[in-house]
Image (cartoon, helix red, strand yellow):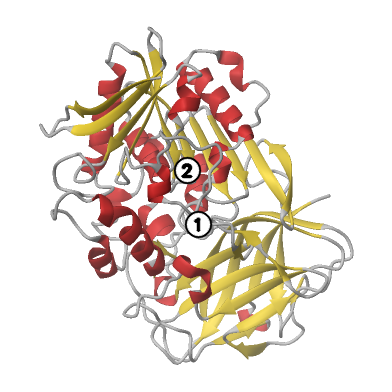
Amino acid sequence: MRIERDIEVPTRTGSPILADVFLPDDDGAFPVLASISPYGKDVHWPDRYPLYELVPQNEHMVWETPDPEWWTARGYAVLRADTRGTGKSPGRMDLMSPGDSEDFYDVVEWAAEQTWSNGKVASSGISWLAIMGWRVAELQPPHLAAIVAWEGATDFYRDFIYQGGLYAHGFVEFWWNRQITPQRNGTEGDDWREVLPRHRVLDEYHQPRIVDLDRVTVPVLSAGNWGALHVHLRGNIEGWTRAASRDKWLVVHTGTHIDPYYAEWALDLQLRFLDRFLKDQPGRMDGVAPVRLAIRHGREVEWRDATDFPLPQTQWRELHLGDGVLDWDPPADATTVAYPASFDTAPVSEPLELTGPIALRLWLSAEQDDLDVFARVQHIGVDGEPIPAIGPQGGPVPMTMGWLKASHRETDPERSLPYRPWHTHTREIPLVHGEPTLLEVEIWPTSITLAPGERLRLELVTGDSDLGFMTHDHPGLRRPATTATVHLGGDHASHLLVPVIPR
């Protein structure tokens, strides 16, 4: 492997982006895997995130990027660049701005013109690097041939910063302190910890950071993780669903935030995909279904191929909220229960698979102007204890979650689907004290298979501080549901719409 470091890549601004390039150790022109991030293009993995004991590990590994040793051995060049204002790239840091995307566009086009390049470039990487793949694809650089978007996001507001209108305070603080502060090379640029809490609705700050998926036309390999209940899963599925690309594949797996990208099965899939579109090997994706899902049976999985998502055979059914119960039949009489509350199905008598998006139609009244709804869906074992999913760092998380700030309840009827309400988030509408009000809560997609004797549980809770950095706990923005009542049955019947997959 040949390595060229600290190359100054010219950009339209006149200020360069600094990059490292890893090349196969022979002459030739190679397809290029490119990435750009504020994490430090040459910060060795153990110095960035020692908690992930990635195997295999080598001296060239950098957080969330393709392994240069693995890819150069298979005839690819690997390019890593520092986002403007971070690492070795000079200038004003303006994360995920249009200028950030334009810098990546210029890096892609520069790479395509080098003598060691065959003129075809793909974006690849996890998380931030995947997000930048979606963003540069929106700009349609002529030599971008494909993107591998592994656990990314496409909607800056809904996926990343304000789930259901609730500010992702814990994540932003954790991530900024650990990932951004060490790599900033100056003081110019917004500090998201200060700026984002001031932009509570989807305004002129958020809008330019949302990908226009109608403009994403390159081949896409989008990989989501059922356990990525924060930042990533929604964006990978929405991105795959709504991208205008003719050639696109979706895979949803389980495991930590990191390990699957470097797993043998994932590298094989990435290689087949990239060989197809960067090496003109048209048969390489033969036999790969448009959709591959890890169907969860507790923490065990079985892989299933499909033609679409949600699955075409899905039967959408309503589980009605009763007094402590979830039932296929509505309550006989109208009643109410205090918020927070928990609702269980009866133990199932035969396997029940729920794979796909979930939506909660929740009638509430309260003696407060606003409140935060936290909805958790749990898989309950025969012993009555939750069977947790695998979270981003390997710890336990619910099977899926949803959030909604009551003042953000307004939906767009043209973009909403029965199983995925679309909230506009453009204004805050106070609650009318004591008046029953419908909240349509988007719960992120999931895969749960109940075995005989097991149950499904819906938990309506007042916070998520137990989930570590996934918490929505900004002291100035939290609106705990302290006076809320949940309405059940009758004219204000609440229900959970679930995706039942026939056996």
Q: Nearer the viewer, mark 2 or mark 1?
A: 2
Q: Which residue is mark 1?
A: 416
Q: Residue 19 location, x and y as percent?
A: 26, 31
In the orientation shown, which residue stands out farthest toward the left? 14
What is the x, y in percent for residue 356? 64, 53
Label 1 Cα neighbours within 10 Å, binned few <14 / some 14-19 / many ≥20: few
Q: Where is residue 376 shown, x and y percent of the image?
A: 60, 70
Disc 1 residue type (three-letter): Ser
Decide which of 162, 391 is in the foreground and name it.
391
- Residue at horizontal 52 percent and vertical 50 percent from the top: 257
- Determine contact: label 2, label 1, CB under 8 Å: no
Residue 212 locus on image (x, y percent): 36, 42
Which labelled disc corresponds to residue 239?
2
Question: Horizontally, is 353 left or right of 477 in the view?
Answer: right
Q: Nearer the N terminus, badge 2 or badge 1?
A: 2
Residue located at (50% from left, 23% from top)? 274
Question: Which amino acid does the dot numbered 2 rest on?
Answer: Gly
Query: Quick one: SS at disc 1?
Result: loop
